[in-house]
Amino acid sequence: DAMVIQNPRYQVTQFGKPVTLSCSQTLNHNVMYWYQQKSSQAPKLLFHYYDKDFNNEADTPDNFQSRRPNTSFCFLDIRSPGLGDAAMYLCATSRDAGTGTAKNIQYFGAGTRLSVL
Amino acid sequence: GQNIDQPTEMTATEGAIVQINCTYQTSGFNGLFWYQQHAGEAPTFLSYNVLDGLEEKGRFSSFLSRSKGYSYLLLKELQMKDSASYLCAVKVYGGSQGNLIFGKGTKLSVKP
């Protein structure tokens, strides 16, 4: 029944060693988002894809990249993880972009908790 | 800048009513969402308000006042399973389409 699936749930990497987190969805939604959530902090949007169009937030570090090879899958690549990148990474999807006041529910995966040693 | 404030923690008793407040100062307003997040799990959608007033959905209700930049989530007949974090999120103009700005969340503990 899981609609937005993130793998793995827990990921440990070494300082500076590239790591990839994955997200898949069975909802056939157009939009996929990646958020970073640190302990007791608000989820912070890193970037999102509308279909194949990539939209990067202005303050997202260059160290974070994303790929969306098809509608169902989206990847978060951290090129050189630092200690400050340890966080929960949440993937979310929505049917459309939700412009204006249209209700645009985002459906979240359970997240991947990343530890950097 | 964008700012969303919620209390960090709240405690309530099983069977009681609790109100979780959220105030916001954002660049535009296109709707306000409440999400529930159990520890180690995905945030799940609870409610959406775009016009002033109260939206009721079972034990949960959400209220919005756009002129005051204020919303609350009301939980009635509290159950132990309601222990979770409750995230307030505002959809803002411009920038990324459908962009949500989240508050830090309110951790609710329900005690017997």
Image: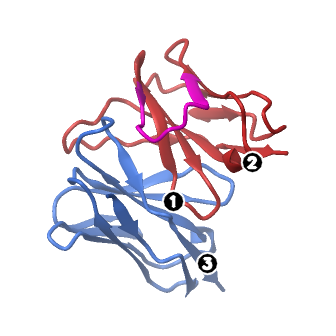
Q: CA distance from mark 3 to mark 2?
A: 31 Å
Q: Are marks 3 and 2 in contact (CB under 8 Å)?
A: no
The residue lying toward the viewer, choosing from A113 and B108, is A113
Say which amino acid is labelled 2.
Leu
Say which amino acid is labelled 1.
Gln
Say which amino acid is labelled 3.
Ser
Give the blue chain's letter. Answer: B
Q: Chain of mark 2?
A: A
Q: Which residue is mark 1?
A: B36
> What is the crowding at mark 2: few (fewer than 14 residues within 10 Å), some, or many (at least 20)?
few
Q: CA distance from mark 1 to mark 2?
A: 28 Å
Residue B85 appears anywhere in the view:
yes
Q: CA distance from mark 1 to mark 3?
A: 13 Å
Identified at 72% across, 37% down, the residue is A81
Asked if badges 1 and 3 are on one and the same chain, I answer yes
Residue A2, position as x, y percentages in the image: 61, 35
The residue lying toward the viewer, choosing from A69 and A28, is A69
Please report the bounds of the magenta region as a residue range.
A55-66
Specify whether A3 is left or right of B75.
right
Which residue lies most toward the top here? A69
Q: Which residue is mark 2?
A: A83
Q: Which residue is mark 3?
A: B109
Instruction: In the rendered view, tell whether residue B65 sits above or below residue A111.
Output: below
Give the red chain's letter. Answer: A
Specify whether A110 is left or right of B20.
right
Q: Chain of mark 3?
A: B
Q: The residue tagged with tag 3: helix, strand or loop?
A: strand
